[in-house]
Image (spheres, rainbow, N blue to C red):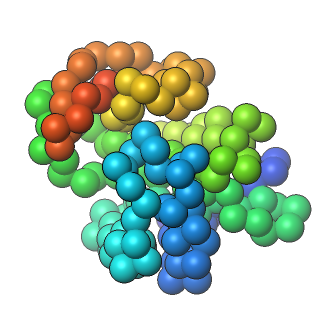
Amino acid sequence: MSRGIETDRLLLTPVAEGDYEDLCALLADPGFYRHIFPQALTAEEAWFRLLRDIGHWQAMGYGNWTIRTREDGRYVGNVGLLNYRRIVDPPLDAVEMGWGLSPVFQGRGLAFEAAMAAIAWAEQHLGADRLVCMISPENGPSLALAGRLGFARYADTTYKGEAVILLERCGT
């Protein structure tokens, strides 16, 4: 099973140790983390996330991809298919999808391009006919992207004490 994905403008590769410095910078950028974490993640926390993502591929056969530009290899962010066993009610009972781009690359359609490639991969390699995602109600751009990707709201709940919206995408 091929794990790398190429699109017109992007290269998606499973997260690897060489992504660490770029991931540290992304997780410390307030324009990125403000809807995800209460504060920047430390270099140590970024390292643990990197190890989690590498291990996810080993354990599940899918996970987060690092997104880079095809043109010059610049780090864009990540997109992934996940099973984090989140404690949330109602439970996330399908493969979870997530995405996050550096603010420098937002607004160019790159998240849509990467996410559509990941969805196609999920359908082909995992037989996924339903995907779910969890987004902060304050994250308007991510909610708009979810809508463009075909996700629809199915529940409002909390996760770790914060309000979240659960969305699902069924079929193609």
Is 150 above or below relative to 40? above
Image spot of residue 145 (x, y percent): 57, 27
Residue positioned 73% across, 50% down in the render: 104
Q: Is residue 12 left or right of residue 122?
A: right
Q: Quadrant of residue 157?
A: top left
Residue drawn at x 31%, y 63% is 60
Q: In the image, is residue 49 above or below residue 39?
A: below
The count of marks equals 0
Q: Residue furthest bottom?
A: 17
* Quarter location, residue 127: top left
Q: Position of residue 37 (x, y in %)?
A: 36, 50
Q: Nearer the viewer, residue 30 or 164?
A: 30
Give coordinates of residue 158: x percent, y percent.
19, 31
Q: Is residue 113 left or right of residue 155?
A: right
Q: In front here: 126 or 163?
A: 163
Image position of 154 with respect to 25: above or below: above
Q: Is residue 9 above or below residue 61?
A: above
Can residue 118 be seen in the rendering of this structure? no
Whether residue 115 appears in this view of the structure is: yes
Query: Residue 114 versus residue 38: which sits nearer the camera?
Result: 38
* Residue depicted at 58% across the width and 78% down the height: 21
Left or right: 46, with 100 as reference point: left
Q: Position of residue 59 (x, y in %)?
A: 28, 70
Most distant residue in the right direction: 71
Residue occupying the point 58% across, 68% down: 25
